[in-house]
Image (spheres, rainbow, N blue to C red):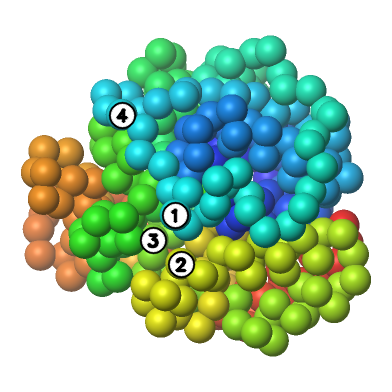
Amino acid sequence: ARKIIIDTDPGQDDAVAILLALASPEDVDVLGITAVAGNVPLDLTAKNARIVCELAGQPDMPVFAGCDRPLGRDLVTAEHVHGKTGLDGPDLPDPTMPLQDQHAVDFIIDTLRSHDPGTVTLCPLGPLTNIATAFQNAPDIVDRVQEIVLMGGAYFEVGNITPTAEFNIYVDPEAADIVFKSGVPLVVMPLDVTHKALVTKPRNDAFRALGTRAGTAVAEMTDFFERFDKEKYGSAGAPLHDPCVTAYLIRPDLFSGRHVNVAIETTSELTMGMTVADWWGVTDRPANALFIGDLDADGFFDLLTERLARL
Ligand code: BDR
Ligand code: CA
């Protein structure tokens, strides 16, 4: 199984991504979960991450709190999408498992130093603040990262928080810039692909039909989470952005994309946080990312439902 750290700001779709990973021990070995401020403030994302671990029946999973604000900006949150708690929808109990004392950034650094180089993959599902801070504080770890598989950005689908920017990148563009320039192999799940991973009614029914706490909770989360995209985009259901990351680790064959150069806009107020992807190869900037554009949505939902049934 591939060793991973999930860096996250739950978030209903983060929660589903975590559940998929925790249900798939033969494919992914989750070394720890690091929370970052994003969809909601840090105290809530650190709490929600633990709610999700308990929902998965894994109260021993180490969960760490990380950065409570972007590198150089005020935090922008997304309660308009995720609700006041960040995990609105199901009625889940407060967690009883502990939050680890260690700072998430130190956990990331220590883990990369204590494992063989090239054996730990980072999976960011929120703003890239924790990852960029770890790279800044401990440049020696950058070369030790096997790969970063992240949810963020958009190209043809442009933006969801501004006309040109996707939320995770927009919240901390300086952090994203550090990560995209780091030289670590990147796999990027932009809105272009995540807007194809839609929880339609039959797919939501399939979660509910599992008849488990996790299945019901996922159905209730996606019920809540779909309001925003249905109203804004006339979408057929909730887009499961972040689960694209964990599904890719299990079944990369479900996804397709191109190796391209992706640069982050950090100066223009108008297009701040835009992921400028050279999809057509019109510059000589070297490729730094596998930018995913498509997925087998039925295969993705079959995998998700089958794995959730285990919890
Ligand atoms: C991303 O932003 C958050 O609201 C979601 O959890 C996802 O990570 C989508 O733009
Ligand atoms: Ca997220």
Q: Return the disc, 1 or 4, that comes first in the chain's sequence.
A: 4
Check disc 3 and give the amino acid type.
Answer: Pro
Q: CA distance from mark 1 to mark 2?
A: 8 Å
Label 3 SS? loop
Q: Quadrant of residue 306?
A: bottom right
Residue count near mark 3 (Cα–Cα under 10 Å), binned few <14, some 14–19, many ≥20: many
Q: Which residue is mark 2?
A: 228
Label 4 SS? loop
Check disc 4 and give the amino acid type.
Answer: Asp
Q: Return the disc, 3 or 1, that comes first in the chain's sequence.
A: 1
Q: Return the disc, 1 or 2, that comes first in the chain's sequence.
A: 1
Q: CA distance from mark 1 to mark 4?
A: 17 Å
Q: Residue at x 68, y 39 (%)?
A: 49
Question: Mark 3 or mark 1: which is in front?
Answer: 1
From what the image shows, is residue 165 above or below residue 66? below
Q: Residue at x 39, y 65 (%)?
A: 191
Evaluate if marks 1 and 2 touch, with contact meaning CB atoms under 8 Å apart: yes
Q: Which residue is mark 1?
A: 80
Q: Assess mark 3: CB under 8 A from ligand 1? A: no
